Amino acid sequence: MRKTLIAPACFALACLALPVTSLAEDTQTKDPSIFTDLDVFQLEYASDTQISPDGSLIAYVRRSNNIMTDRTRSNIWTVATDDGDHRPLLSGKSGYSSPRWSPSGDRIAYVTGAEGGTPQLYVRWMDSGQTALLTNLTHAPQSIAWSPDGTQIAFAMFVDGKPASLASAPAKPEGAEWAPAFKVFEDVLYRIDGAGYAKPGHPQIFVVPADGGTPRQMTDGEFNHGGPLSWSPDGEVIYFSANRNDDWERDLVEGDIWRVDLNDKKLTQLTTRDGPDNSPLVSPDGARIAYLGFDDKMMGYQTPRIYVMDIDGSNRTLLTGEFDRQIGAIAWAGNDELIAQYDDRGRSYLGRVTLDGEVTPLVRDVGGTSLGRPYTSGGFSVNAKGDIAYTSGRASRPADVAMKLSGGSSTRLTHLNDDLFADKTLGAVERMTWKSSADGRDIEGWLVTPPNFDRTKKYPLILEIHGGPFAAYGPNFSAEIQLYASAGYVVLYTNPRGSTSYGDTFANLIHHAYPGEDYDDLMSGVDAAIARGFIDEDNLFVTGGSGGGVLTAWIVGKTDRFKASVVAKPVINWTSFSLTADFYTLFYKYWFANPPWEDPDAYWARSPLSLVGNVTTPTMVMTGEADYRTPSAEAEQFYQALQLREVDTALVRVPESPHHIAGRPSNLIAKAANIIAWFERYRTDKETEE
């Protein structure tokens, strides 16, 4: 079974009367002074920022969209921290990724498929520019980590296993053309969204000499061994996380910290509790290990916290027990403190964490690596001096490279999209809060007004709802939101109850109760936007994807106040979803109290399909044809039910697309164009505006 699992935090076009290109022309003005659909191909952003050991350079992955191949390309650039000298380091159509500095800063390891075939591990010498191919791998290397002395590089790689089979087919006659062989699956997890039907095998940990050679496999067995990988200072041990329990496929949350001794490949388990322990990091002096985890209480949302233990696994200490914000990544800054990335009220922060658990914010503008919708995102790295490189995002720009010197201020070092936006007016993003009609609780959201907004006019409103549901929007750049604004809509996006970055209590208000009062949070937000005085109450629209698709379908089953809706990649029937989703071993245990056959009424009561008899709102349904997170049958159930009820509806299927519909630039454009086209069909204010 393939190991590269993404922990589920949440969860092209047919059937419209006009082709996508015509829809885009009809609904998107080509005014060059505002953000338009083809501008998506001009967007760039920084990711994977890696600061050099001496702090003089930051290597990063510069990502841009290729209009001819309709793919996002990745190349490695560097920027000097003293004068901002900005130049390509490794660039080409094959793509370059995962830059990692050697401990002395004289080399960079990276991954590319420049020579064709499977991406391989390379090293570049910084003084001469010479490069060396280190590996001849069958699968791409992941989680690259240099040994402290710079002589070895560890990585994780998927290792093929033996396919399952039952019967042997008879030999076919020479030249005969028979049907393809049957595919047999016996693993619990047999398909994964974005990867398809799983190949037999597991990720294992390898070590290769830094000047090339044969990689040595350090782990084996039918278990998943993953990164990040952390070396002991003497270079004799690698620490990693894994679930090596026999029932690992049925318990996706579980995980423990392990060590492997390179001399004899002996494995030692360091943590044993019921819950996920992961991301181990050895302190520079080798005395401690910091890691993330929590005690599994079977809640829908559980906040990862920082723990520290001695190098042998003893004296485990919870550092951030009173800090209930979601921590996404950590790094040592010296031996006595850590840097942590965490989300707070829709923003991503970096903070200093002392060994007594005190958290001090350092920067609040991490993000900008989610181009489609305004999710929290981003990343960082730290060197031994405590200098930080990170991705800096804003509501008006995707991620740039920024740095914060130890004890100093933050500086943005790149301006990747200033040329694109120099002569464009974007939709303005304004934070707003309101009281929920459910219980008076404070709810936060952001209102985006069209370019050249005139407060004396009335505008149609789109309520855009995030997925997850355990996720968060924030004041971050969003191509989709900006396209809606360019089409003349005010857009409201929000963090209703269940959203992360507001603490455990707020997120778990929807535990075993989703969808529920988050509906009230959203409707109260629409009322608050209308109260601003520039919203046309007769032209309200609603859309959302994944968890947002659930809520959109739920909303139109409870109210007819919206002129039209678009339900994207939803769950419509919790029973069918829980038995067809890729991570089906997780959802029924954490999102419900019992499996569906033991409590069918609970599943039905929370299914938007139960309310379909109330729906009168014209509703378009959108789904990826290769979506295994919320399989397309979910969307089609809703479409067919609406057809049976003779409600205006359309089904949009995105060819070859997994759950992330907007993964290719043209799909992002087409997604927004189809949503706008559907709403334009039912808008009634167009003549009066003209």
Image (spheres, rainbow, N blue to C red):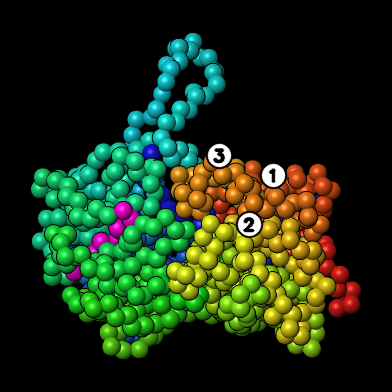
Marks 3 and 1: CB-CB under 8 Å?
no
**Residue sitting at x 13%, y 50%:** 261
Where 139 falls versus 549 (above or below)? above
Instruction: Compute the Cα span from label 1 to label 2.
Output: 13 Å
**Residue sitting at x 13%, y 68%:** 287
- Residue behind mark 3: 597
**Residue sitting at x 78%, y 55%:** 614
Where 390 falls versus 159 (above or below)? below
**Residue sitting at x 59%, y 56%:** 546
- Residue 363 in picture, x, y percent from top left: 39, 82
User: Mark 3 vs mark 2: which is more N-terminal?
Assistant: 2
Where 246 falls versus 230 (above or below)? above
Instruction: Name the dominant secondary structure of the magenta segment.
Output: strand
Quarter assignment of residue 527: bottom right
Left or right: where 685 falls relative to 68:
right
- Residue behind mark 1: 637
